[in-house]
Image (spheres, rainbow, N blue to C red):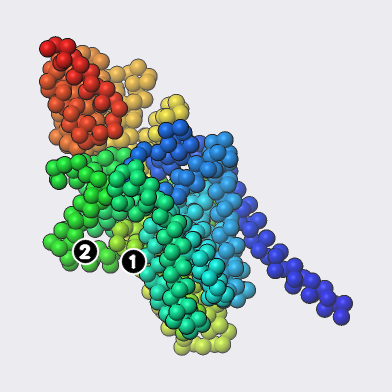
Amino acid sequence: MQTSGVFEKLSRHSRWLTPLLIFLAAFCIRVVYLNQISTIPTFDKPIMDEQYHLALAERINSEEGLPDEPYYRAPLYPYFLAAVFNLTAESVYWTRIIQILLGALLPLLLYFLGLMLFNRSVAFWSAAIAAFYPTFLYYDAALLITSLMVLLTTLLILQLYRCEKNPVPLQFILAGLLLGLAGLARPNILLLGPFLIIWILLVIKPQLGWKKALFSYGLIALASFAVVLPVTIRNYTVGNDTVFISWQGGYNFYIGNNRQASGWSATVPGIDATWGGGFKQSIAISERSRGKQLKRSEVSDFWFELAFEEIKLDPGNFFSLQLKKLRLFANGFEIPNNQNIYLAREFSPLISLLMFDSVLFFPYGLLLPLALLGLAFSVRYWRKYLLVYLLLSSYLITLMLFFVCARFRQPLIPMLIMLAVFGVVQLIKFFKKRDVKNLSLTLLVFVLLLIESNHDIAGIDRNHLKAEDHMLLGTAYLDQGRLESAKREFSKSIKFDPAFALPYNNLGLISLRRGDANAASQYFLKAIQSDPQTLEPYFNLATQLIEKQQFQQALEILYQARQNQPLNDFVHLKIGSTLYQLGRIDEAKLAIEESLRLNPDSEFARLSYQQIIDELNSAE
């Protein structure tokens, strides 16, 4: 009796002890990773999307707030970041700590979900894998929406299963609130809403009957709409424009489905590849085509229409592109969209142990084949796993409609982990039962899936990817004034890709800082020769010539830049200011007018234009 009491106490304690240990392990491993990557030069001064999010958060916290226009991207993460910034006194390190603290909850959620859907063994191993899964570690420490979106998606599925277990109105309302909140993080998750009708009809209706089942679905819809509605109202109020959440959908759809689309790249040939440049040119191109200034929703509509026109012209290409995106989703290589995730291996011994991309694209290249096996084994219990199927299918559709990369598929990985563990459990059962037939067939299918997930389908130039990595590191060092470190990284970048223009340009900037103008000019010319579409070396070379009072030569350089990038507002502004210095006022006025037309928000262009107008008026 006494022994029985001890086991009863241990069993009772394990109910909270196991989840606690999972959370602590997940948090500690993330702290280790965070401190390892703190030596990356972009840690305290992020670049690209991280920098964009920080700038938005700082502006939200400022007196001026965000611009009076509809949101370009879904707003949840910038506001979340702004709130955390207030808590941490704008400390990037402690902001990342709070984010990994939230990220450490994911294995815990997966443990509880595994208990509901499978058993204690599957739940534990799923949580353990999630605690150490390298891309979770990476994105939990990154100032991107990815980590929060993964957490919200898993929490949403857990709540929907709670609705099954206890189908009372409050549970459905909570599910709707989570769906709406996730929609404010990434609107594509809202496609799950219509798919939930299937779940309502097949799972909830048998429990509650027609009327209560439809009422429950209505509660989900109304609750999610109530979360999103303030954003829609705000967009209409500030922009007199009907934008549901954000207006980037049309341009992103074009990126993913134009006739030159790769299926993974977030750029369009002929349009500025930088975030800010692409944003401005997406507006400029649409307005030039329509011949008038457009509302943001009209800009989005333009790109949707242009994409559909190209699809009609070549439907075969469109369907083959969708197949390629499906294969990209299954492929184990972590396709970069912001920064190359494999770069973290150079700074974190932990990540270098947990993730690699040679021979096998580990871990996703192993996870996906095992998850597909688990998916196949689960079909006999399809009603139980229906919500998982609906999430996977609805979210995958949205990925294929746009483009596929590593961070966009992250929200599905928790479900794939559970299915993969379930698949391994079934394989072990076949082995223990000596079921040679089923074991052999399953292993054959697994090998075929493994081959599919571990070959290069994206066609990414790995050398150029490494060149971009070193260029980004060098740029961060350059911004910090660490010239030798910057030079070393730019030289490495050129070694991996001798035709890469930006490192040549930045070596020119280093030469300028060291007072070697001749060497700087040579680097700028080399950058222009390497890639005539890259504008920075044109601007830098023109500035050098202007400082030498060689205005006509500077104009010739700038005219070349304009010929290559006619929709870049800064090219026209630079030409206008140079013409102004030459005393060609009327030509300068026209150039700056074009710059303002392309970018009406440019304060410097507006001031330059006003100066010209004042001078012309005084001359009269």
Amino acid type of the residue that numbered disc 1 sits on in the rendered structure:
Ile
Lateral position of residue 197 relative to residue 568, left or right:
right
Location of the C terminus (image quadrant): top left
Amino acid type of the residue that numbered disc 2 sits on in the rendered structure:
Phe
Q: Is residue 143 visible?
A: no
Q: Which comes before the other along the chain, label 2 or label 1?
A: 2
Q: Which mark is residue 318?
A: 2
Residue depicted at 87% across the width and 80% down the height: 1
Q: Which mark is residue 397?
A: 1
Secondary structure, mark 1, is helix
Specify few, some or many for label 2: CA neighbours under 10 Å numbering under 14, 14-19, or 20 or more.
many
In the picture as drawn, the residue positioned furthest to the right comes out as 2
Residue depicted at 57% across the width and 53% down the height: 102
Q: CA distance from mark 2 to mark 1?
A: 14 Å
Lateral position of residue 348 relative to residue 544, left or right:
right
| Percent of width and height locating residue 39 | 53, 38
Q: Quadrant of residue 188?
A: bottom left
Residue depicted at 50% across the width and 47% down the height: 80
Rendered view: 580 above or below 182: above
| Percent of width and height locating residue 516 | 32, 18
Specify few, some or many for label 1: CA neighbours under 10 Å numbering under 14, 14-19, or 20 or more.
some
| Percent of width and height locating residue 443 | 45, 78
Q: Which mark is residue 25?
A: none
